[in-house]
């Protein structure tokens, strides 16, 4: 397929359009002159093969962004291993196979940085995939995402479909999940700090030692990277998408508390797991192609906190 690939005039299906990532992609596509297709779960359950195939046959999307997934933090992954593995396998297998059956021109599959080995050399290059054991606290989700990458590669190799994959780092932004039972670290910190400030609490407690380092990317930057890759990338290998820098969880917690305005103590529950010690991806591949993120971490957190205060939590 010739590059650059044009989105203008195309029918673009965003799977998972109600999620944080999918909704950001929908917002970004608004300026591309394309027709954005969405399908709520009441209309199409992506876990059900027949429903997915019938919808694709009817709507005939020319481009697919596969952002649908069952997601959650350490607690959710540890509590629901079968759900995380089965549901994500079904979603990606059904959508990718239906896209092939409908001769979709281009598909972008979105994975996660948790696909990489727990002790991968830092920063993590794309070639680190499958070179070591995964982090146990989210291996079910990771295995499903690895299968999605390989399925895209298999359809490309066997049938010549232009299916590509991108691996985002830890994301945050509008539409994030602030439920403490299932959220990731960033929204959990924002909610804890906010509620502690309102309650006049002396401290907040966070999981682990605070020493693990994490990389964060605003979801709107990821959406921009998705459009960039759809237009400019057509190769077998997956592409990392990150900010290029990381931060210790303890420093992140202090940054969040300062932005929220909570001046109390941060207590570390060291009986709880830390997860992967460090997870910084190399985004050299996409940066060398000409893309770069726009948001700084502090500005991004401040904008999310502003939006959070008007939410239902």
Image (cartoon, rainbow, N blue to C red):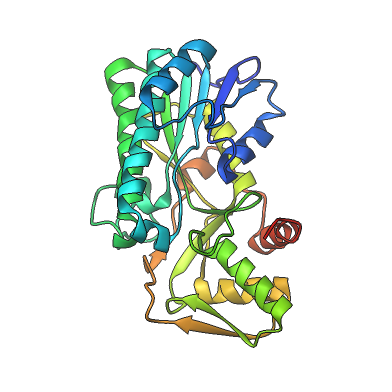
Q: Residue at x 45, y 59 (%)?
A: 73
How many numbered discs sit on the rendered protein? 0
- On the question of residue 279 being in view, the answer is no
Q: Residue at x 53, y 37 (%)?
A: 289
User: In the displayed structure, would residue 192 be above or below residue 27?
Assistant: below
Position in image of residue 241 (x %, y %): 50, 46
User: In the displayed structure, would residue 162 be above or below residue 130?
Assistant: above
Furthest residue in direction front, as rendered: 42
Position in image of residue 247 (x %, y %): 52, 68
User: In the displayed structure, would residue 164 be above or below residue 179?
Assistant: above
194 and 171: which is toward the camera? 194
77 and 216: which is toward the camera? 77
Q: Residue at x 41, y 63 (%)?
A: 75
Q: In which quarter of the view is residue 312 placed? A: bottom right
Q: Residue at x 39, y 32 (%)?
A: 47
In the displayed structure image, the side of residue 313 where residue 52 appears, left or right: left
- On the question of residue 156 being in view, the answer is yes
Looking at the rendered image, the quarter that the C terminus falls into is: bottom right
User: In the displayed structure, would residue 148 be above or below residue 120?
Assistant: above
In the displayed structure image, the side of residue 38 where residue 238 appears, left or right: left
Position in image of residue 38 (x %, y %): 59, 27
Position in image of residue 19 (x %, y %): 57, 42
């Amino acid at each position: 397929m010739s590059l650059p690939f044009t989105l203008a005039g195309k029918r673009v299906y965003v799977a998972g359009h109600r999620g944080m990532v999918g909704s950001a992609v929908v917002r970004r596509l608004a300026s591309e002159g394309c027709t954005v297709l969405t399908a709520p779960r009441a209309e199409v359950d992506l876990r059900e093969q027949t429903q997915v195939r019938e919808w694709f046959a009817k709507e005939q999307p020319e481009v697919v962004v596969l952002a649908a997934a069952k997601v959650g933090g350490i607690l959710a992954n540890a509590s629901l291993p079968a759900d995380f593995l089965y549901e994500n396998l079904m979603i990606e297998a059904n959508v990718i196979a239906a896209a092939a059956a409908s001769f979709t021109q281009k598909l972008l599959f979105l994975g996660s940085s948790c696909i990489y080995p727990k002790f991968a050399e830092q920063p993590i290059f794309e070639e680190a995939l499958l070179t070591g054991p995964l982090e146990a606290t989210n291996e079910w989700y990771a295995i499903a995402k690895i299968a999605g990458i390989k399925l895209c590669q298999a359809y490309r190799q066997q049938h010549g479909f232009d299916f590509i994959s991108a691996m985002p780092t830890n994301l945050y932004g509008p539409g994030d999940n602030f439920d403490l039972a299932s959220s990731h670290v960033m929204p959990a910190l924002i909610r804890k700090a906010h509620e502690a400030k309102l309650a006049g609490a002396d401290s907040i407690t966070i999981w682990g030692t605070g020493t693990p380092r994490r990389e964060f990317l605003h979801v709107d930057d990821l959406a921009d990277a998705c459009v960039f890759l759809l237009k400019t990338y057509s190769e077998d290998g997956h592409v990392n998408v990150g900010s290029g820098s990381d931060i210790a969880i303890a420093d992140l917690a202090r940054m969040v508390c300062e932005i929220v305005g909570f001046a109390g103590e941060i207590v570390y529950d060291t009986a709880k797991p830390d997860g992967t010690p460090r997870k910084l991806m190399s985004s050299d591949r996409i940066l060398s192609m000409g893309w770069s993120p726009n948001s700084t971490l502090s500005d991004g957190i401040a904008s999310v906190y502003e939006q959070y205060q008007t939410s239902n939590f």
